Amino acid sequence: MKREKTVLITGASYGIGKALAGEFIRDGYHLVLTARSEDKLTEVRSELLEKYPQRSIHLFPMDLSLPNAPAMLAKQLENQHLNVDVLVNNAGYGLLEKFHTSDINRILNMISLNVNNLVHLTALLTPAMTAQKSGGILNVASIAAYVPGPNMAVYYATKAFVLSFSEALHEELKSYGITVTCLAPGPTKTRFGEVSGMEASLIFQMGAQNANEVAQKAYQGFKKGKAVVVPGFKNKLTILFSRIFPRTWVRKVVHKIQKIG
Ligand SMILES: NC(=O)c1ccc[n+]([C@@H]2O[C@H](COP(=O)([O-])OP(=O)(O)OC[C@H]3O[C@@H](n4cnc5c(N)ncnc54)[C@H](OP(=O)(O)O)[C@@H]3O)[C@@H](O)[C@H]2O)c1
C-alpha cells in the first residue's frame, strides 16, 4: 500500500506559508505546521480540516529564530512518530532600514531565522530522506536573492544565501531521490510588507501578487522538480534585467527604489 505523505511547513500561520499549506493538503498531504502564533495556526487548521476532514494536521507553535528551535522541533516530531517527506522552509522576514542605524539584535535574529535555522532544520531532516531515497525540500528565497539591496542589505544577503544553498542541494541530493526547489517570489500581498516596512515602498506600489497565486506556482514547480521557481512574468523580467545590466547600475537602481527618508 502506498504510504500517505506528510509535509512540514514553517511560517504557516500567514501569507505564503498558509497558502502553501492549502496547496499541499489539496494534493493529499498530511500537514505539520509551525510558526509563533498558536491562535492563527489553530485557525488555519480549522479552516483546512473543514475542507479536508480526512487529513491530519499537527501544530508545533514555536519561535524558529531561537538557536535550539530546529532541534526541539525535530525531537517533537520524533516523539510523535511523525515522518516528514517534504520540508518547506518558508518562515522569514525582512527589514527596510539603513544598516548603520539598525538594531544589531534584530538583524542577527533575522539571520537566525532566514538562514541559520533553515540550514539547521534541513540538516536534521535530510538524513531520513536520503535513507528513504525520497523526499523534497522547498526553500523560500526572493527575487531579492539576485541583487544587492541597499537599505535592506542583510535581508537581500540572507535570500542570496538561500538561493545558492538550495541550488547546490538541488544537484547534491538529486541522486538520493530528493527534489530541492527554491521559490523566488517578488512583492506579494502578505504581512511581509507591514513587518518589513516595505508596504509604502515603490517596489510594492508597482504591484504585488497574491499569496495563493505564488503558492500555486511554487507547488506546480516543486512537483515538476524544478530547481528554481519565479512566479509571474514581471518577476522573471526583473531577474533578467538584473543579469543583463551591469552590477554597478543594478545596485544603484535598487537603492533608488528602496530610498528611505
Ligand atoms: N511577501 C513578499 O513580498 C515576499 C517576497 C519575497 C519573499 N518573501 C518571503 O516569503 C516568506 C514568507 O513570507 P510572507 O510574505 O508570507 O510573510 P508573512 O505573511 O509575514 O508570513 C511570515 C510567516 O513566518 C512566520 N514567522 C515569522 N517569524 C517567525 C519566527 N521567529 N519563528 C517562527 N515563525 C516565524 C510568521 O508567523 P508568526 O508571526 O506567527 O510567527 C508567518 O507565518 C518569507 O521567507 C519572506 O522572506 C516574501
Image (tube, helix red, strand yellow):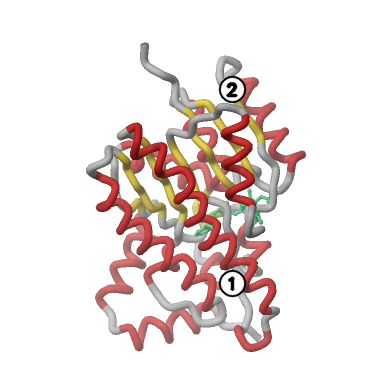
Give the left or right position of residue 127, taking residue 255 as reference.
Answer: left
Q: Report the residue at 59% width, 21% height from top.
A: 51
Ligand 1 has an atom within 8 Å of the beta carbon of the residue at disc 2: no
Residue matched to label 2: 56
Give neighbour class at mark 2: few <14, some 14-19, many 20+ (Cα, 10 Å): some
Disc 1: CA contacts within 10 A as few (<14), some (14-19) or many (>=20)? some
Callout 2, which amino acid?
Ser
Residue found farthest to the top: 1
| Residue 219 at least partly seen | yes
- What is the x, y in percent for residue 57? 61, 27
- Give the answer, above or below, for where 139 lies relative to 236: above
* Secondary structure category for the residue under label 1: loop
Q: Residue at x 45, y 59 (%)?
A: 141
Q: CA distance from mark 1 to mark 2?
A: 40 Å
Q: Is residue 236 left or right of residue 77?
A: left
Q: Is residue 232 visible?
A: no
Which sits earlier in the primary sequence, circle 1 or circle 2?
2
Looking at the rendered structure, the kind of residue marked 1 is Ser
Q: Note whether 195 is above or below 31 in the view shown.
A: below
Q: Is residue 94 left or right of residue 141?
A: right
Which label is found at residue 201? 1
Location of residue 195 in the rendering, given as x and y in whole percent from the top left corner: 67, 62
Q: Is residue 256 left or right of residue 238?
A: right
Name the front one of labels 1 and 2: 2
The single residue placed furthest to the left in the displayed view is: 175
- Residue 183: x and y in percent read 41, 52
